[in-house]
Image (cartoon, rainbow, N blue to C red):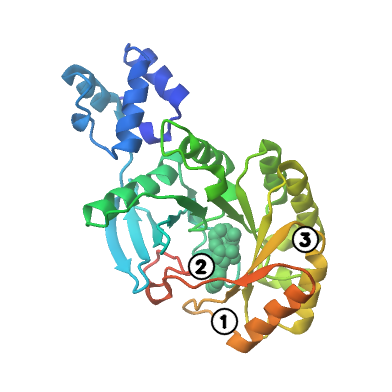
Amino acid sequence: MATKVDLSSFNLTELEDFVSDELGEASFRAKQIMNWIYKQGVVDFEEMTNLSQDLRSRLQGKAYINKFIEITRAESKDGTVKFLFKLRDNKEIETVFLPYQDGRNSICVSTQVGCGMGCNFCATGQQGLERNLTTGEIISQILEVQRLMSSSGYNSSLITNIVFMGMGEPLANYDNLLKAIKILNSNETLNISMRRITVSTCGLVPQIKRLADEELQLVLAISLHAAEDEIRDNMMPINKRYPLEELITACEYYLERTNRRITFEYALIDGVNNRHEDAKKLAQLLSGLLCHVNLIPINPVKDLRLSRPNREDTKEFKKILNQNNIQATVRQERGKDIEAACGQLRTENN
Ligand code: SAH
Ligand code: SF4
């Protein structure tokens, strides 16, 4: 028996081709199906009541709409909800829902099971890479969370912002990621503006250039964490392959092509990268770039000895950046009590 295809991995053109080539139906059916999947959040063909019974059964025979099993859910006192989902091959990923006071709802989406980049301060990095997520699995995280939040009575569950900051390195799964982003951005689906989508990377230089050439209005976030190669080499193995100079050149190219302000993430670890000298070096490295620095006091990760700087030191670090004309903010912490904060996502049971 031929394997079934996942319709949540399809863009409109692919769905139209599928509907006409595989099912012999008029291509306008594709828009109806898209509407069910994205606007109504339906995963069962039986619920697609404007399709004939015959078409529904044929769809059933050839296709499916990806769906996860919710294994656990943890709710933070700040409203953040962390879901652990089981995939069709029993692997697990985490997705985090982040509601804001002003009515926006952000979702932190995973792009891989685990991560192969091995950053020494990150829980996901300790797990290693298991596999890339498919386009459908990336998209389904958003649909699933919308469904689950609304069925548990949260009446404003629509996702307005997407951050690719969950498990995995998004740009190491470039094609599936870009396809998912373009689908989510289109009119037939959730119509999420590119400006409300953030892609965070540890610094894969060729992919940053490739992304620049797409000229999308996305927010690019670079996990920088150090302004000197020696320090960054120790924290992030990727720096040995693409050292800071190359990374900054790629960022300049990104700015040239998109004119979109870049976010630099800098996790402050006491005694590693938080000296005044580090702040000055960081300001120097970024001087003249259209950018913003997000300072993140390091979040604890089991088995890793990471100490956070105290509040005063963090303030001082920010002040030095500001004095040197670099915009910086200290990131508001979310979901730390449920280990849903940056760098705390890992699915191994240990
Ligand atoms: N792989 C991508 C995106 C996922 S990580 C990347 O590295 O950019 C999301 C953010 O959390 C990254 O900026 C990452 O560097 C940061 N992070 C990882 N571990 C952390 C920790 N223990 N505390 C705070 N931030 C952490
Ligand atoms: Fe991977 Fe990002 Fe964690 Fe590094 S910080 S190990 S790139 S998820």
Q: Nearer the viewer, mark 3 or mark 2?
A: 2
**Residue 271 at least partly seen:** yes
**Crowd class of label 3 (few under 14; some 14 to 19; many from 20; radius 10 Å):** some
Residue 64 in view in this figure = no
Q: Percent x, y for residue 199?
A: 58, 51
Residue 71: name its quadrant.
Answer: bottom left
Q: Amino acid at mark 3?
A: Pro
Q: Residue at x 19, y 26 (%)?
A: 49
In what element is the residue under mark 2?
loop
Query: Residue placed at 45% from the left, 41% from the top?
Result: 134
Label 3 sits on residue: 243
Residue farthest left in this picture: 53
Q: Is mark 1 within 8 Å of ligand 1?
A: yes
Q: Amino acid at mark 1?
A: Leu
Mark 1–mark 3 distance (CA, rounded to whole Å): 23 Å
Q: What residue did someone put label 1 on?
A: 306
- Residue 248 drawn at (x, y percent): 78, 57
Q: Is residue 161 above or below residue 344?
A: above
Please give the label number shown on residue 342.
Answer: 2
Which three-letter amino acid code belongs to the residue tagged 2? Answer: Cys
Could you tell which of marks 3 and 2 lies nearer the N-terminus?
A: 3
**Of 346 and 12, the residue lying toward us:** 12
Report crowding for label 2: few under 14, some 14 to 19, many 20 or more residues within 10 A (C-alpha). Answer: many
In which of the image's four quarters is ligand 1 placed?
bottom right
Q: Dividing the image into 4 quarters, which one contains the C terminus? A: bottom left
Q: Name the secondary structure under disc 3.
A: loop
Is 173 drawn above or below residue 189 in the view shown?
Answer: below
Compared across the picture, whether 318 is left or right of 1 comes to right
| Nearer-N-terminus badge (2/1) | 1
The residue carrying mark 2 has its beta carbon less than 8 Å from ligand 1:
yes
Q: Compare residues 129 and 28 and report the one nearer the observer.
A: 28
